[in-house]
Amino acid sequence: NVAFALRVAREPNAAVAARVRELLELVHLEEAANRYPHQLSGGMQQRVALARALAVEPPLLLLDEPLSALDAAIRDELRAELRRLQRQLNLTVVYVTHDQAEAMALSDQIVVMEKGRVSQIGTPQDLYDRPATRFTAGFVGSSNRRVTALMRQNGHASITWGNAHLPVHAPADTPAGVPVLAMWRPEAALLVDPLDPDPGTLRGEIELVTFLGPVTRLDVRVDGDNEPVLVDVVSDAARDLAMGQPVNIAVPPGAIRLYA
């Protein structure tokens, strides 16, 4: 399998054998050199495919969802392996995936596509922290999103969200009353004193508690809103939180992004 392209190119047998050994060592399969495909795991078969593609030293490697059929543990292992190989061989890799975590972990630059058109190009951090379009904002990562109206009073801008008036940073030329799509990430929220009457905080009740390892996700039913708000809390700080518990949520103005 690994030697296929080299044999098609009529490389000398000794050169083919040496290159195959080199590639199997590169993908950590030297001990499996004499096994048949049906004797290999899914992850090992993907390593073989990668070695076969690398055999001819391509200037560009195209990978089309190569890890989609693998279980989570093997996927994480191969993801790290691909990143290592890309760095070690100084390869340009075009990697197609629907898995956002995969894209974030592997990429120096991401192109987000919407219906065949480019929605945004940027680093993983740019796309996550500063999504430029409504599509990117909704597609990359979890977020809370609402269509609402921009309000202005005494030089300060805010939006209505459920029972609260959340302060926001809005461009000076955006007039009051214009409808906007507001978006903020679950980890941007802060839990504050549930007895705090501050009109700039969301008041609600925990509807669902989901442990996700390092963070715990809260689905909070906010007074006056039909959809729950997602809040991510460091798991150590969430031990005493339970369904039905009242909470107040503050969202820093800089964490809320607005779109026309």
Image (spheres, rainbow, N blue to C red):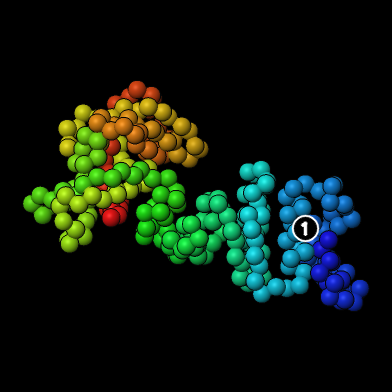
> Which amino acid lies under the numbered mark 1 shown in the image of this protein?
Val
Residue 231: x and y in percent read 37, 38
Residue found at the very far right of the displayed protein: 13
82 vs 38, left or right, is left
Which class describes the residues within 10 Å of circle 1: few (<14), some (14-19), or many (20+)? Answer: many
Vertical position of residue 7 compared to residue 126: above or below: below
> From where the camera sits, is residue 87 visible?
no
Q: Residue at x 61, y 70 (%)?
A: 92
Seen from the viewer's position, the closer of residues 41 and 94 is 94
Task: List the residue tagged with mark 1.
Answer: 48
Residue projecting furthest to the left: 154
Q: Quadrant of residue 204?
A: top left
Q: In the figure, is residue 90 to the left or right of 234?
A: right
**Secondary structure beneath disc 1?**
helix
Q: For the image shown, how many numbered marks are present on the structure?
A: 1
In the rendered image, residue 22, in percent from the top left (x then y), is placed at: 80, 67
Residue placed furthest toward the front: 115
Residue 29 on image: x %, y %:
79, 57
Relative to 120, say whether 244 is above or below. above
Q: Residue placed at 59% from the left, 59% from the top?
A: 96
In this view, 181 is above or below 117: above
In the depicted structure, whether residue 104 falls above or below residue 12: above
**Residue most toward the top?**
244
Quadrant placement of the C terminus: bottom left
Quarter of image, res 6? bottom right
Q: Position of residue 207 (x, y in %)?
A: 37, 27
Q: Nearer the viewer, residue 127 or 248?
A: 127
Q: Look at 24% across and 40% down and name the residue there.
A: 161
For residue 162, say whether it is visible. Answer: yes
Instruction: Identify the residue at horizontal 24%, vertical 31% (top origin).
Output: 224
Q: Quadrant of the N terminus?
A: bottom right
